[in-house]
Image: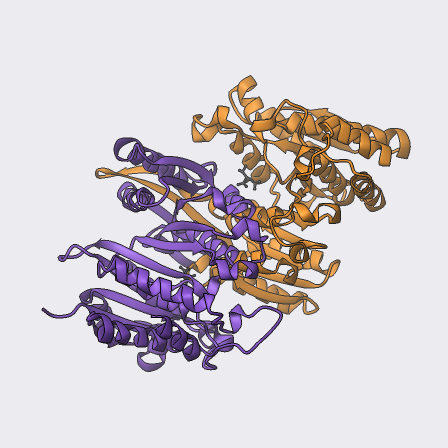
Chain colours: A orange, B purple
Amino acid sequence: MTPPSILILPGDGIGPEVMAEVRRVIDWFGANRSLNFEVIEDLVGGAAYDEHGTPLTDDTMAKAQAVDAVLLGAVGGPKYDDLDFSVKPERGLLRLRKEMDLFSNLRPAQCFDALADFSSLKRDVVAGLDIMIVRELTSGIYFGEPRGIIEEGNERVGINTQRYTTSEIVRVARSAFELARRRDGKVCSMEKANVMESGILWREEVQKLRDEEYPDIELSHMYADAGAMQLVRWPKQFDVIVTDNLFGDLLSDAAAMLTGSLGMLPSASLGAPMENGMPKALYEPVHGSAPDIAGQGKANPIACILSFAMALRYSFDQGEEADRLEKAVENALADGARTGDLMGPDGGTPLSTSGMGDAILKAL
Amino acid sequence: MTPPSILILPGDGIGPEVMAEVRRVIDWFGANRSLNFEVIEDLVGGAAYDEHGTPLTDDTMAKAQAVDAVLLGAVGGPKYDDLDFSVKPERGLLRLRKEMDLFSNLRPAQCFDALADFSSLKRDVVAGLDIMIVRELTSGIYFGEPRGIIEEGNERVGINTQRYTTSEIVRVARSAFELARRRDGKVCSMEKANVMESGILWREEVQKLRDEEYPDIELSHMYADAGAMQLVRWPKQFDVIVTDNLFGDLLSDAAAMLTGSLGMLPSASLGAPMENGMPKALYEPVHGSAPDIAGQGKANPIACILSFAMALRYSFDQGEEADRLEKAVENALADGARTGDLMGPDGGTPLSTSGMGDAILKAL
Ligand SMILES: CC(C)[C@H](C(=O)O)[C@@H](O)C(=O)O
Ligand SMILES: CC(C)[C@H](C(=O)O)[C@@H](O)C(=O)O
């Protein structure tokens, strides 16, 4: 039997550093748990642009389509700010999402107990928080046509189009309902149905699917602005939140920041099942490329390592091994392992990126 | 000389209750400060729909165009949830904004010291917070065409269009720069230029205006998702934030909630100067119609009263009287005046809506 395959795309900024630690974790599972993977590596984002003049080559795209899972570090950086829109680092990531059709983006916002005091929110508001934001990832205003900047008389006009079809809404809502069944059975859907017709359609289709196929799920609807408020006020009222691509971008980032654990949060982007029954999938940390600390060995690799744990769970059907890895991260933290982003005001010497990798391997 | 004119639109939910207190404040200024206004009142939102079958009659629209300032309470409520999109309560408010061309929506997010502990954020993160969000209010995805729900094969498709022109961006950016000059001279502009062309145009035009006409302003740019994060992490890094209609909707609500003072926050929506040099203007509290407590005399009238203070400042050139009113609110709070939304866990008997009105009149 050929081992399952992984394409690693470290990308830009701190991407390569944190991904190096993931490789060590992957090797550990091969050596100690007989879980072997065929790992290939390639370029994405600014790194791909520097080498090939495009943030994602067709060849890399083909590899991503062929493997069982893609792990991505991060893309972007000030160096690429002035590039033309069509070759910006982000276009590489967006092309992967779109062509792999990864419509369901799972973004857990979890507060690690050892880190609850790092949140800007009061401890009781966030301690124990565990919500899951399901963001639609392949449609909406990110991809809708027409788009662009046109001339009109003396003016320039910037145009983007929000566009959602019934089936696009239904498939991501379904994934949220399925997740909720394995959690607390509650879904809150967010849109702006009071001002956008695409929000009305969203609300109607989500409700219809609930009524027809998920009567056991407790479904509520909230306007996205009220949702942003409620996330700040009392995030524990939520279990699963389902929302569109653009609202999901803002709301999931706000939710991640609430937890005080930004350097810790993984994400999974899932598509339709492949021949083997597992979904097409790309895993990446929620944090960005952090150009300010790139190359200094300061970055926290945990978000990227936990993204691999999500891969174990959702792509390789290794729920127990995923638990094992998540537990090891928790134990390393409980033993006091801290990278710079996790240091309190009382100081101490932070671990380097590989030092945190060591601590997690030890805990494994 | 005819006195300046005000159109009062109490609207739905708690709107009428809180507006009753504003009328008492207006009367106080007439009796004690020789500031007389010609006040007329009319319907908007669900209240207008109930009476006329439309959330804003042409007649009311004409009155709004004719007066010096409009004060609005709140619109919407579950009773109207199933109404057709075109007659929803919100359409009344949106029509006012659009036809009066109120392109610049000023939303202060201020943390009142006496209330800092009501925030879900830590005291040091929010105490003394004073930022101003300037939201574009008459364009973007709220109003862009094409829009609607269409059939395509077996599918329904929901469509909305984000559309910004150079001049729409420039005029709201200008109002943000002008405000910043009277504050700390810092503006942060937020968009998603990494994924939306309308965001690229936004960023370019804002930067160009700064370079050509406001070299004294310190301008930065942030992606809106990062902006949502940073608002949660350390809001005091901001002075003035300028952003589009949809991002402004979410970001200003999140910022308002940060302060713990949601029932306290006013807003002003300003348009082009009228013949007398003052801008067209509509003032409204940031909070909504709060149907759950409507009609019970529990609502906090402060946000609506402070909206009138903004009217004194921006429409009637009475900055000192605005200060006087704001000071009275502060003093009433310092003396312990509290409506139910401002009660700590230790309890006590909350003031009614009119009880809070009494306390503020007394402080005046
Ligand atoms: C990098 C960028 C294109 C991306 C997005 O906007 O989706 C990022 O913010 C994210 O949330 O993954
Ligand atoms: C009531 C609604 C139409 C409105 C909006 O979305 O603009 C409200 O949320 C606001 O922010 O004033």
Left or right: where B141 falls relative to A113 = left
The answer to whether A336 is drawn above or below residue A174 in the figure is above
Q: Is residue A53 visible?
A: yes
Q: Quadrant of the N terminus of chain A?
A: top right
The answer to whether A299 is drawn above or below residue B123 in the figure is above
Left or right: where A236 falls relative to B111 = right
Q: Quadrant of ligand 1?
A: top right
Looking at the image, which residue is at 55% across and 49% down? B125
**Quadrant location of residue A138?**
top right
Q: Front-most of B302 and B12?
A: B302
Q: Front-most of B158 and A311?
A: A311
Looking at the image, which residue is at 29% across and 46% down? B175
**Whole-percent x and y of residue A18?**
69, 29
**Whole-percent x and y of residue A251?**
55, 51
Q: Is residue B85 visible?
A: no
**Whole-percent x and y of residue A181?**
73, 61
Q: Quadrant of the C terminus of chain A?
A: top right
**Quadrant location of residue B241?**
top left
- Residue at the top extreme, as displayed: A51
**Quadrant location of residue B52?**
bottom left
Left or right: where A14 falls relative to B357 = right
**Whole-percent x and y of residue A252?**
58, 49
